[in-house]
Image (cartoon, rainbow, N blue to C red):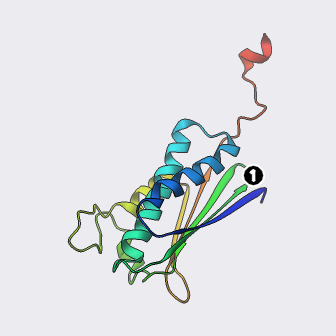
């Protein structure tokens, strides 16, 4: 591990954008492309939204814990809550599955996370809640010159 951050935020919808921005800013250390940064932001947004909507469905107060670290050319991200967890993780990872009642939800959160990240693991936490672990490898461009630039 080269660097890490840990942030705890209240599980309220306005903090979704803050969480996404914090992790994206931290990922800048790896010099990602715009597309890579967009992938990370989208995956974090989905994970945090799932914590808010599904982890604390009754609106009770709770927190979201975000941990991220840099490992070589990869960013490792863990997003967890201490909410209700998921009774059937395998079913929840299927496209279009949702437990939200009375709301328009696509049921695509885990599918989107899996599409944009290289690794996705989902597990219920002992004592309650859920932990989503994601990882994305990025091609480091720091100090790398193209053949054209070095020839000049």
Locate the C terminus and report the quarter of the image it occupies: top right
Local crowd size for mark 1, using a 10 Å CA cut-off: few (<14), some (14–19), many (≥20):
some
- Farthest residue in the top direction? 152
In percent of the image, x 54 and y 72: which residue is there?
80
Instruction: Tell me where residue 47 appears, x and y as whole percent.
Output: 46, 63
Residue, x 44% and y 70% (percent of image)?
Answer: 51
The answer to whether residue 28 is left or right of residue 125 is: right
Up-down relation of residue 49 to residue 128 (above or below)? above
Q: Nearer the viewer, residue 73 or 43?
A: 43
In screen coordinates, is 18 left or right of 135? left
Percent from the top left, x then y, of residue 109?
38, 61
Q: Is residue 109 above or below residue 59?
A: above
Residue positioned 53% across, 58% down in the render: 19
130 up-or-down from 3: above or below:
below
Pick whichever, 48 or 110, lies toward us. 48
Residue 78: x, y in percent? 59, 66
Residue indicated by mark 1? 72
Quarter of the rendering occupied by the N terminus: bottom right
Secondary structure type for disc 1: loop
Q: x, y (%) of residue 96?
A: 28, 64
């Amino acid at each position: 591990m080269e660097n890490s951050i840990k942030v705890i935020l209240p599980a309220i919808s306005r903090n979704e954008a803050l969480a996404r921005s914090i992790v994206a800013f931290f990922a800048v250390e790896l010099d990602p492309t715009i597309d890579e940064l967009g992938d990370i932001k989208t995956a974090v947004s989905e994970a945090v939204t799932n914590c808010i909507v599904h982890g604390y469905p009754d609106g009770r107060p709770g927190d979201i814990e975000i941990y991220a670290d840099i490992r070589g050319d990869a960013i490792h991200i863990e997003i967890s809550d201490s909410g209700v967890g998921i009774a059937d993780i395998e079913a929840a990872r299927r496209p279009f599955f949702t437990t939200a009642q009375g709301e328009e939800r696509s049921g695509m959160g885990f599918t989107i996370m899996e599409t944009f990240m290289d690794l996705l693991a989902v597990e219920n936490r002992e004592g309650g809640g859920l932990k989503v672990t994601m990882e994305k490898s990025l091609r480091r461009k720091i100090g790398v010159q193209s053949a054209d630039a070095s020839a000049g």
